[in-house]
Image: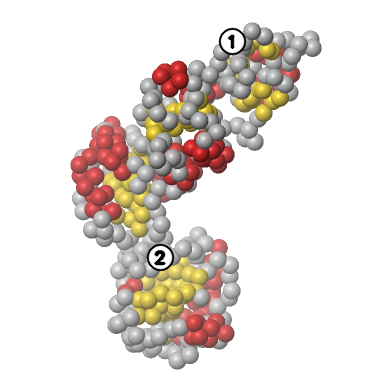
Amino acid sequence: MLLFLNKSSSAQLALQDGFRAAAGAFRGEVRRSHGRDVWGGGNGIPQLQCYPSPAQVLFVVVDVTGFGADVLPFFGLTPADAPTLRLVKMENNRKYRMDQDTFSDTAIRTFIQDLEGEAAQVFYEVASELVDVPFGVAKAAELFQAYGLSADTVCLFKKFDEGRTDFPVDPARGLDAAELTRLLRVHSLELVMEFTNETSDEIFSAKIPHHMLLFLNKSSSAQLALQDGFRAAAGAFRGEVLFVVVDVTGFGADVLPFFGLTPADAPTLRLVKMENNRKYRMDQDTFSDTAIRTFIQAVLDGKVKPHLMSAEPPEDWDTRPVKVLVGKTFEQVAFDETKNVFVKFYAPWCSHCQAMAAAWEELGERYKDHEDIVIAELDSTANELENITINGFPTLHYFPAGPGRKVDVETFSKFLENGGTLPEEPPAVSEVPHTRGPGLHSHVPAQGKKSPKQGSS
């Protein structure tokens, strides 16, 4: 396995850390052979020597501006191609490359005595799925001893946190592909991640159901010190809660509006339930590991209510043709039993919402003198509701008047076929244009409009 780099570049030199971490998973697999193998196989091409045994892996760094420059033509490379990776099969000089060079800092190795057994086959299946991480297998007794193992074990090698995580193979149950994949993905992440441009994709694709966020100003040494308690709390929730540090003056500044925060609010903590973006906060931020663990466990046990953002209502919010709702005024309007209420949930930046704005205002003008019809809108980027989750913009919700009003499949069909009107109290909405992306929903109260039952069409 060859890492081509320019040794005069500190950034490229840093890539050796991940390369070395991957090599650790294959340590002990290289032996001298009696015959000498070379890249290029002679034919007048300058040769570098290595001595791997068949089907094993030797990790080599090649300086493209030094001695390694002579072998670049054999790989069809120039110094400008660095950094890049190639794997060479020495018996036939076949060369392999990634679709896109990825310099991972993790590697996975299974130590297993039966390479044809069921557990080994599961490991091969997982390896074929996790294509961005180097995998290897070993069965030699001396390697088990060298790594302090006495039974079949999957080992994850990494250059951060504890450096290595072992997953023993259960003699009775063997390996479960889905569970092994989950564990490897979880432990391939740092225990505490920093939210950056480089890590954001890892964080959001981790499929960890909760994220615990520490917002701080990295230019403050006092705030940086708060990471100690945060890290100490993280281990107890690995796989269930991902701990993330967000620099409010750096890359993390862009996500502050989603939490209703400004840089001046740091340091502060938030827990997010990823399935519905519900956010939770302490009554008063306390940064000890004990306080953080207690808070997280209370959220997981359902003992803490979500923290819901709400903007302040404009002074004239209820005198406009289109009523401007906010989180704290939503229920009193939408759940008013005497009125049919049609609400548009929007985001200011959404082009579909902008395209609908004029028609929505016109609809408000049309029905502004109807006492039993309310046309309203709510900015979902600044307001959150406990019983309603908005997944796309714009989304339209209709709240019919009266308690206990039944809406079934037949009624939904009529709602669609009649251009968006319900049979009894029709809020004619034929002027609302069709746009891509919106959702249209009807909310019907079970009793007194306090617990709306949601349906969608």
Q: Nearer the viewer, residue 24 or 221?
A: 24
| Residue in view at x 47 percent, y 46 percent | 178
Q: Nearer the viewer, residue 328 or 104?
A: 104
Q: Tell me residue 46's x, y (percent).
A: 73, 10
Horizontal and vertical percent for residue 398? 44, 79
Check if mark 2's residue and mark 1's residue have beta carbons within 8 Å: no
Q: Amino acid at mark 2?
A: Thr
Is residue 339 something that shows in the picture?
A: yes
Q: Give the residue type at disc 1.
A: Arg
**Image quarter of residue 84:** top right
Tell me the crowding category of disc 1: few under 14, some 14 to 19, or many 20 or more residues within 10 angstroms, Cα based: few
Q: Residue at x 52, y 35 (%)?
A: 117
Q: Nearer the viewer, residue 342 or 240?
A: 240
Residue 389 disc label: 2
Q: Which residue is mark 1?
A: 32
The quarter of the rendered structure image containing the N terminus is top right
Left or right, 299 with reference to 365: left
- Above-or-below relation of 439 to 27: below
The local secondary structure at tag 1 comes to: loop
Q: Is residue 404 left or right of residue 395?
A: left
Residue 326: x and y in percent read 35, 68
Please, is residue 220 above or below residue 314 in the view?
Answer: above
- The residue positioned 40% from the left and 54% from the top of the image is 274
- Out of 327 and 29, give the one closest to the viewer: 29
Asked if residue 67 can be seen in this view, the reply is: no
Label 2 Cα crowd, 10 Å radius (few <14 / some 14-19 / many 20+) = few
* Residue at far bottom of view: 424
Could you tell me which residue is drawn at 36 percent across and 63 percent down?
Answer: 384
